Image (tube, rainbow, N blue to C red):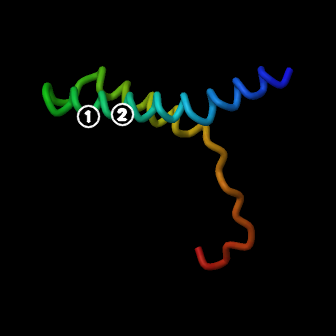
Amino acid sequence: MVPNLIRRFVIMAIAVPLAAAGARKLSDALEARRGPSRATRLLRQGADTLGGFRRQKRRRFSFGR
């Protein structure tokens, strides 16, 4: 049970952000060489989706914003 929990934590904490950064870097490289295309747009959207899995900070009493 504990090894499964550790494995899941490692995947979510390390592998997912690395995959998102790799997809974004690949998208930038392809776009620089060949210009914008459907593939680069999908890579960027995938990176944005993977980056969105992080939990948002809860703000309470944010009167100044």
In x, y percent, where is residue 15?
54, 28
Nearest the eye: 28 or 61: 28
Q: Label 2 crowding class (10 Å Cα cut-off): few <14, some 14-19, many 20+? A: many
| Residue occupying image coordinates x 63% and y 31% | 12
Measure the alpha-carbon separation of dots 1 and 2.
6 Å
Q: Secondary structure at mark 1?
A: helix
In the image, residue 65 above or below residue 7: below
Residue type for callout 1: Asp
In x, y percent, where is residue 32?
16, 33
In the rendering, which numbered label is found on residue 24?
Answer: 2
Q: Quadrant of the N terminus?
A: top right
Left or right of 30 on screen, residue 1: right
Residue contact between numbered discs 1 and 2, judged by CB atoms under 8 Å: yes
Residue type for callout 2: Arg
| Residue placed furthest toward the front | 3
Left or right of 15 on screen, residue 34: left
Nearest the eye: 28 or 62: 28
Q: Secondary structure at mark 2?
A: helix
In the rendering, which numbered label is found on residue 28?
Answer: 1
In x, y percent, where is residue 17?
51, 35
| Residue occupying image coordinates x 74% and y 67% | 60
| Residue placed furthest toward the bottom | 64
In the image, residue 14 above or below residue 1: below
